C-alpha cells in the first residue's frame, strides 16, 4: 500500500500538467486604431462527451462597424491527448453588410487526415498529433503557462496545404492595469520569420489561470486591433 501511495504521489505532478484549463467566460472591449469598435465574448468549457469548446463572438457596436453589422464568430472543438489539446473541428464566420466570409477545418486523427475549406477552395494539409487551429492556440498557451513552461512555445497550425510551426515567446512577469484590477501577467509575443511588420502580443493573467487579459495585433500598414478585458467569470 505504501509503495502504491508513493507511486500515486509521484504521478500527481504529471497528471496536473495534463489537466485542461478551467472553464471561463470573458468579455473584451475591441478597439481599432484606438477607437472603440465593439465587444467580444470568449468562452471555454467542457462538453458532456469529454471534448472542449472554445468560442469567440465579436460584435461591432460603434461607428461604421455598427452600421455595417460587423460580426465575427469562431468555434474550436478540442480533444485532450495526453498533455496537450488537439483540434477536432474549427469554424470561422465573418459578416459585414452584405458580405460573408467562412472558413472551416476538420481533423480525423484516426485516419490521419485534415480537411479545410476557405470559401470554395479545399485543402488537405498533412496530419500530425497536437495540431491546432489559430483560435485554439490561446487554449494551448493557457495550458502551457499554467504548467510552468517558458521561453519559446511552438504549435502546429494548418495553413492551406501545409502545417506551420507558430512560435510564441514568453517574457518576464509584469503588472498590467485592467478593468478587473491590476494583475500580474505574462507577456507573450508571436515570433514571425517573415519580418513583414505584423506583430501579435498577448498578456495572460497569472492569477486568472492565464486567461488572456489583453491582446494587440499590429498590421504592416500601421493599423491595430486591441482587445482589453471588461469582465471575467471563472466558476469555482
Image (cartoon, grey):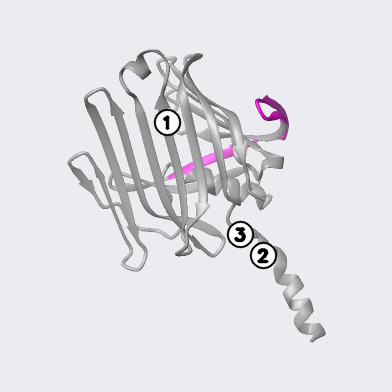
Which is nearer the N-term, disc 1 or disc 2? 2
Q: Which residue is mark 3?
A: 19
Residue 98 lies, in percent from the top left, at: 21, 24
The residue positioned farthest toward the bottom in the image shown: 1
The disc label shown at residue 58, or none: 1
Magenta stretch, residue numbers: 165-182
* Relative side of 28 to 206, left or right: left
Residue 116 lies, in percent from the top left, at: 28, 48
Looking at the rendered structure, the secondary structure element under dot 3 is loop
Mark 1–mark 2 Cα distance, whole angstroms, equals 36 Å
Which is nearer the N-term, disc 1 or disc 3? 3
- Name the image quarter holding residue 179: top right
The mark closer to the camera, 1 or 3, is: 1
Q: Which residue is mark 2?
A: 14
- Indicate whether 179 appears above or below 51: above
Tag 1–tag 2 contact (CB < 8 Å): no
Looking at the rendered structure, the secondary structure element under dot 2 is helix
Q: Residues within 10 Å of mark 2 (few under 14, many from 20)?
A: few
The residue positioned farthest toward the right in the image shown: 2
Mark 1–mark 3 Cα distance, whole angstroms, equals 28 Å
Which is nearer the N-term, disc 3 or disc 2? 2
So how many labels did they put on this image? 3
Tag 1–tag 3 contact (CB < 8 Å): no
**Residue pictured at 23% horizontal, 27% vertical:** 99
- Indicate whether 56 appears above or below 236: above
Q: Residues within 10 Å of mark 3 (few under 14, many from 20)?
A: some
Given residues 36 and 147, the one toward you in this image is 36
Tell whether position 73 is magenta. no
* Relative side of 22 to 70, left or right: right
Q: Which secondary structure class fits the magenta region best? A: strand
Mark 3–mark 2 Cα distance, whole angstroms, equals 9 Å
**Residue pictured at 48% horizontal, 26% vertical:** 39
Amino acid at each position: 500500500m505504501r509503495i502504491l501511495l508513493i507511486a500515486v504521489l509521484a504521478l500527481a505532478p504529471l497528471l496536473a500538467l495534463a489537466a485542461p484549463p478551467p472553464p471561463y467566460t470573458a468579455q473584451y472591449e475591441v478597439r481599432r486604431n484606438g477607437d472603440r469598435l465593439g465587444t467580444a465574448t470568449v468562452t471555454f468549457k467542457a462538453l458532456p462527451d469529454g471534448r472542449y469548446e472554445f468560442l469567440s463572438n465579436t460584435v461591432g457596436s460603434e461607428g461604421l462597424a455598427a452600421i455595417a453589422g460587423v460580426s465575427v464568430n469562431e468555434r474550436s472543438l478540442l480533444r485532450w491527448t495526453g498533455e496537450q489539446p488537439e483540434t477536432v473541428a474549427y469554424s470561422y464566420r465573418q459578416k459585414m453588410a452584405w458580405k460573408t466570409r467562412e472558413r472551416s477545418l476538420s481533423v480525423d486523427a484516426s485516419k490521419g487526415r485534415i480537411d479545410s475549406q476557405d470559401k470554395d477552395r479545399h485543402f488537405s494539409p498533412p496530419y500530425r498529433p497536437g495540431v491546432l487551429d489559430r483560435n485554439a492556440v490561446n487554449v494551448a498557451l493557457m495550458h502551457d503557462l499554467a504548467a510552468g513552461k517558458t521561453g519559446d512555445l511552438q504549435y502546429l497550425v494548418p495553413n492551406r496545404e501545409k502545417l506551420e510551426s507558430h512560435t510564441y515567446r514568453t517574457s518576464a512577469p509584469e503588472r498590467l492595469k485592467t478593468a478587473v484590477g491590476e494583475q500580474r501577467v505574462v507577456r507573450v509575443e508571436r515570433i514571425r520569420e517573415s519580418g513583414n511588420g505584423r506583430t501579435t502580443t498577448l498578456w495572460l493573467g497569472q492569477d486568472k489561470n492565464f486567461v488572456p487579459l489583453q491582446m494587440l495585433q499590429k498590421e504592416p500598414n500601421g493599423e491595430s486591433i486591441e482587445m482589453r478585458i471588461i469582465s471575467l467569470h471563472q466558476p469555482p
